[in-house]
Amino acid sequence: MEKDEPSRCENCIIRQFNSLRAMSKDELKKVSDSKITKTVKKGEAIFEEGDKLDGVFCVRNGISKLSKLSANGKDQIVKLASKGEVMGQRSVIVEESTNLSAVALSDMELCFIPKDSIVHTLNSNPDFAVEVLRHMAHDLKEADDVIVNMSQKTVKQRIAEAFIYLKNNYGEDAQGFLNLTLSREDIANIVGTATESAIRIISEFKKKGVIKTSGKKIGIVNEKMILDLIEGF
Amino acid sequence: MEKDEPSRCENCIIRQFNSLRAMSKDELKKVSDSKITKTVKKGEAIFEEGDKLDGVFCVRNGISKLSKLSANGKDQIVKLASKGEVMGQRSVIVEESTNLSAVALSDMELCFIPKDSIVHTLNSNPDFAVEVLRHMAHDLKEADDVIVNMSQKTVKQRIAEAFIYLKNNYGEDAQGFLNLTLSREDIANIVGTATESAIRIISEFKKKGVIKTSGKKIGIVNEKMILDLIEGF
DNA sequence: TTGAAAAGATGACAATTATCATGTATATAT
DNA sequence: ATATATACATGATAATTGTCATCTTTTCAA
């Protein structure tokens, strides 16, 4: 006696956001039967650089950072993943160990989908393959943009840009603070700078009145000024 | 009366290197019938950022740079494409105008393949879709690595790394000079720095005896030292 | 609750890198 | 062959960013 419970992939709203929507009923059922739901606490690792993943992780709730350790011991955050996004697909597709680590930035709910069902559907359902391809193409374009920003913009510009990104993607609360609260170190690791440099620039922004802070929460006060800062004024 | 001429895709050796190998005989024939062979001289543009591409370019010969213009007017080279590589696929897949410009770094021979046959095969042949997906996954990993290098390594380290990359990917001639000769400006645009800074560091490397130059040709003299420089010594 | 540990903040200084100026060499077209 | 543009080179200087040291605040577990 099957119920219409949300834990079945067929009914999962998250599916609307990702490639799984291109799967057939049967394929989805198989995924649903083999998937494992996981809960991860803020700060916990989901997987580590170099791990061999035998499946992908679909984010149902919360936000995760995807980062790569550099030779000098600093983490570079390459991407943030939130509701509906799939992590680890690159690694599963090319059958290599993953090049990134995933760590929860907030409490998270994840579905782990074993690679078999993914790989099988990939090889038999072109619609699904094309959907995954579209997502990866999008990620690649974003990565290109990051490369250009990293090399051509100053730290100040990159931090200003990060705030706009956070606002546009994760929104702000009733008091005007960004919903996603990051440590200064994480902000530094996103824009690729020293933690002290990030802190200094954040203080400067605050002094100038373009942002406000409350504890580690940050709110955009003057978006126009932030946009100007991005342009280099 | 068909001949076994190399201009037919079915016989093109280049195919071994790219996703086209996953196409069926019929699909390949269609591609072959609709493709256009082009010759491009060194320095000429193949497409420009923002262009709507109605097909992809397959490199038969020569090398092209894929770059993106930054707000401050500098070009950032995001990737080099050579024999067997396909350019413009990202744009065709997501049906957006391209985010990159392609300019020939040497005289080139290209095949232009109209998007119809690509898109059609993508949607009907999972093997092909997966092959393209693999390539894109590989590009994405490389892009991640570039992001980390850009943000965590010094210009000196990045230039040293670029020389090793050029040697490993395009080889060197009998006299020990890199086969791919780039202008100092292009080198600067690969590693994301000012042209003068690149020139200065190249001069320094030469003075130290790690590289040699002859005109604009550059040769690696002491690979061990270059590898040390990459590590930051 | 308290005391250690982690995160945030800031100064001082050094290192890296960009910018501007100018000069030399090299390539290219007439 | 010569002019002219382009690429290469280098100095001087300024701006940016990183590093180290120290202090304060916040967080969290015992």
Image (cartoon, coloured by chain):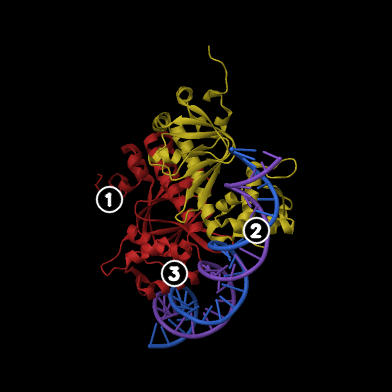
Chain colours: A yellow, B red, C purple, D blue
Three-letter amino acid code at the position of disc 2: Ile
Residue sitting at the far top: A1
Q: Which mark is residue B196?
A: none
Q: Is residue A151 above or below residue A82?
A: below
Q: Secondary structure at mark 1?
A: loop
Q: Chain of mark 3?
A: B
- Could you say where residue A113 lies in the image, as x and y percent from the top left? 46, 30
Three-letter amino acid code at the position of disc 3: Arg
Q: Secondary structure at mark 3?
A: helix
Q: CA distance from mark 3 to mark 1?
A: 37 Å
Q: Quadrant of residue B120?
A: top left
Q: Are marks 3 and 1 in contact (CB under 8 Å)?
A: no
Q: CA distance from mark 3 to mark 2?
A: 33 Å
- Could you say where residue B139 lies in the image, as x and y percent from the top left? 43, 48
Q: Residue at x 45, y 50 (%)?
A: B88
Residue underneath mark 2: A201
- Could you say where residue A71 lies in the image, as x and y percent from the top left? 44, 55
Q: Secondary structure at mark 2?
A: helix
Q: Quadrant of residue A104?
A: top right
Residue underneath mark 3: B184
Q: Residue at x 40, y 66 (%)?
A: B182
Q: Is residue B29 above or below residue A36?
A: below
Q: Which mark is residue B6?
A: 1
- Could you say where residue D30 lies in the image, as x and y percent from the top left? 59, 38
